[in-house]
Amino acid sequence: MDSWVRFNTQSQGKERVLAAQYACMLLGYTLHKSSVATDLQRTISELEAHMSLTRKVLRLGNSVEALQAAKTTIHLSDSVLRLCLTIGHLNRAMYFACDNVVWAGKIGIISKLDQQKWSHRSFYYLFALILNVTRDVYELCLLLDCEDCYRSTKSPLSTSPSSAILADQLSSSSSSSSIPVTPTPAVMWVWLRKRIHQIGTVLYNNPPLLLDLLKNGCDIFIPLDKLGIYQTGPGFVGTCGLLSSVLSIVTMLHPWLKLKP
């Protein structure tokens, strides 16, 4: 099994090169909006269909890789990472297995396959992406907590102006009256700007987390559109798919940019 996983992992680069499928989708959408000749649109549509089928061929065996990854992540010490990653890999395994069945139906190995019914396999993909985003948010929260602890230990006596104003308001309101007083919108706006800046700084200093969050954010619109939950159209889906594939290629060229575990 380990040999098959290593072989299958090497084919991932070929699959990502077929990001041209999403480029064809985006190009076809642009040509349709531009009212270009229907023959060219038909050619682009057929090319996209062929690339989609080729991707399904290259995905044969990906379910085995996902199961192998689940066997690894189930032993993680962090319970949140263990839950998100393991269940996410299991959902990916189910999605790829269903995708293999759809491929077999399209080439005639399985006759009379209900393509509409099997199109709901995208629910597995969507749930896996939701868990991936949850993992990214969890990692971000851990880094923000570490940043707060570092700042508090570095300068325990110093506080930001917004925090000082907020503390003064709360202390004055508690000393003068027992009625709770909420902070003013201006103070809350300063605090929010500071928090957004802190999040941006943490993501900037952690490129693997930033790239993974961007990739999952792009990927999640694909099953949402396919399932009809949030339809955005082929132009937006093509852009998201192309951007996600480019980010995946970047992580392959530079392995240190891949989020671990």
Image (tube, rainbow, N blue to C red):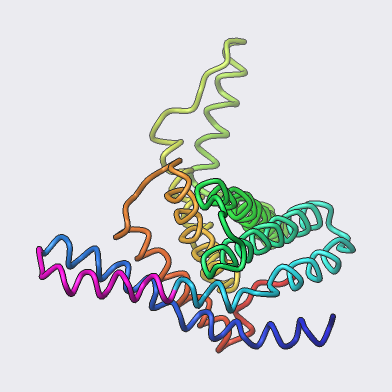
- On screen, residue 57 versus residue 184, left or right, reads right
| Point 85% across, 69% down: residue | 72
In the image, residue 242 above or below residue 5? above
Q: In the picture, which quadrant includes the N terminus?
A: bottom right
| Point 71% across, 62% down: residue | 93
Position of residue 133 measured from the top left corner of the image (x, y, whole percent): 60, 54
Tell me if residue 44 is in the magenta stretch.
Answer: yes
Residue placed furthest toward the front: 111
Position of residue 26 measured from the top left corner of the image (x, y, whole percent): 29, 67
- On screen, residue 149 versus residue 249, left or right, reads right
**In front here: 24 or 260?**
24
- On screen, residue 44 versus residue 152, left or right, reads left
Q: Quadrant of residue 41?
A: bottom left
Tell me if residue 215 is in the magenta stretch.
Answer: no
**In front here: 260 or 218?**
218
Q: In which quarter of the image is residue 209?
A: bottom right
The residue range painted magenta reads 35-51
In the image, residue 261 above or below residue 197? below
